[in-house]
Amino acid sequence: MAAADKIRDGEILLEMKDVHMLFGKVIALAGVNLEIRKGEIHSVIGPNGAGKTVMMNIINGLYRPQQGEIFYKEKKINFLKPYERSKLGLARTFQKVEVFGGMTVLDNIRLGRHIHYKSGIFSGSWYFGKTAREENKHRAFIEEEIIDLLEIEQIRNKPVGMLPYGLQKRVELGRALALEPELLILDEPLAGLNLEEVEDMARFILDINEEKRWQVTCLLVEHDMGVVMDLSHRVFVLNFGNMIIDGTPKEVQNNPEVIKAYLGEDDLYSTRK
Amino acid sequence: MTTTFLPCGVYHENYIQDHAWWQTKFIKGKMLLLFFLLFILIPLLADTYILSICNQIGYTILGAIGVQLLIGYCGQLTLGHAAFVAVGAYTSTLLILEFPWPAILLNLGLAYPISIFIAGLMAGLWSVLFGLPSARVKGFYLILTSMAAQFIIVDFIITQYVSQIGGRGQAFSLPPGTIKLGPWLIDSDLKVYYLMILLCIICIVGVANIMRSRVGRAWVAIRDNDISAEVMGINVIKYKLLAFFYAGFIGGIAGSFWISNLAAISPEHFPWSWSLWLVGVILIGGVGSIHGTIFGALFMVLVMESLQLMVLPLADIYPKLLMDFLFIKEAAFGLAICMFLIFEPNGLAYRWWQTKNYFNLWPFSY
């Protein structure tokens, strides 16, 4: 576990300090502290309604916490809008796929690179010259780096709305990758996929985390314990707004409170291994 | 957004080819034929009546592109586009009639072209003003706020105040000789036709290009899913307002063009029903398609004209038909939209796409 130790001492990419989120009188998050270090896969697990997605929404700015602070690369990002945070290198995928159904796969991924394009309404209307060169440059990146990695060559010109669910998830991952993020939030990337697709997706997550080209830090929300325990460097367990433990997979598996709250009886969990 | 299949045996070797509008020699030839038809054949063969119909089609296209951009591409429902067309028409007219143009610009015939551009800007800015509620409201509620544009701009500001400028009362009349494009005086249907073709091509090319670049993609993303669009780095409000500006700009150009065809302009030329008509055009043509705008405009104008041609002989037998024609026209409009929504909700553009693919994939088209 030398590599994991190295990550453990690495610089902190994202930090949540004592974050409280309330919807009326419902306490979704009650003082959550989270540290994500560069290069790790940090998983967040917890029962349904624990506040995992709320946490993700707070990190990328869809919700504003009432109390607490969020730092990204030591910069406070509490008051940045989602589109401003994405410019810092924060990308995410959604639990229910939120692709642009009317656009082709290629256009979806191109849109993911929105912040890297430069053209405006005038140069876009004229198109020739600068905009055309820009489109070609990014097209090369998309084809060579993303479509090739995710193996979606044959569907690149299909409208995403017509694709099966598993491929939509893959396109969504591609769209998030096109942003060239430093921190990628994966909100249940494996939900609703069959075994083969789960294996593929887990492979992709490992690839983008470990390959020299990407080295993306991942924040993973997932219910599939087998995958979570295998992939993650650290696991954060949330139970109805409260943190139970933030530790290595081994520590989490042996923690009696986690077993009571989430993992359940041993035999139940082992069937998903 | 859907791509057409290439014929068997045709393939691309680089991204530029794949991103081009006209991807095969056959399509290039077809488009050349189309330009030949538009620029040479129609002006050569058509009489004044057909030219005036063509101009009407062009005006409908210019108006509907803006609506297509807002509804079809950006997902912002609008029912007030006629107001921005009116802003364009009135800005252009007022500039031509009241603005103290330097003699050199007048002699060069630049007054009207410049006024077209300024009319576009003015209409765009008004459109942005009435697009501001889109930051907060969506869908049906946005329809209501956009309808306010009609009542505030046309029924109130233009009718009550703008029409009084110069003490003319109701209508502005443009004396012959005021509308000049460079050395050409726009005084016949043929010249209006050429101006129309020119403006249509500029606007269509502009919209088509922007839809394959950064801004256009952001608009479609907002239409399909505004939350994930924002997460992917798009400033949703800014891009919505940009869409309103662009649509208003083209609406202003449409209005500014139309004054070359009208001897006098008055608020009645821009009724609220015209906005509805433009939405009907894109529904019939196909929402979210530039082809659709053109097909819809062709369909609407041609069907209405042929209806008129059918009614006229019948009026000899049943004279009341002539009086009722306006209502017949509107009923036909309603019926056409109903039929399209039920039998071809994707519009004429979808049929066109299917036909093209049928021939491209032949003999394996199924």
Image (cartoon, rainbow, N blue to C red):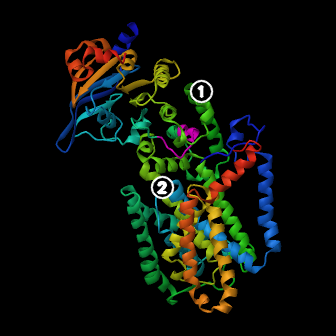
Residue A236 appears at what percent x and percent y? Answer: 29, 22
Work out whether A106 lies above or below A254. below
Q: Residues within 10 Å of mark 2 (few under 14, many from 20)?
A: many
What amino acid type is highlighted by mark number 2?
A: Gly
What residue appears at the point 53 percent right and 21 percent down from the top-left corner? A213
Measured as percent of width and height from the top left, residue A200 is found at: 50, 22
* Relative horizontal placement of residue B8, taking residue B234 as reference (left or right): right
Q: At 60% from the left edge and 72% from the top edge, which residue is drawn?
A: B256
Count numbered badges in the picture: 2
**Chain under disc 2:** B
Look at the image and give the residue range highlighted in magenta: A99-110
Front residue of A169/A186: it is A169
> Does the rendering let one see residue B147?
yes
Residue where numbered disc 2 is placed: B75
Position of B9 compared to B57: left or right?
right
Q: Which amino acid is tagged 1?
A: Asp
- What is the x, y in percent for residue B72? 53, 56
The picture places residue A246, in percent across and down from the top left corner, at 26, 19
| Numbered mark located on residue A148 in the image | 1
Q: Residues within 10 Å of mark 1 (few under 14, many from 20)?
A: few
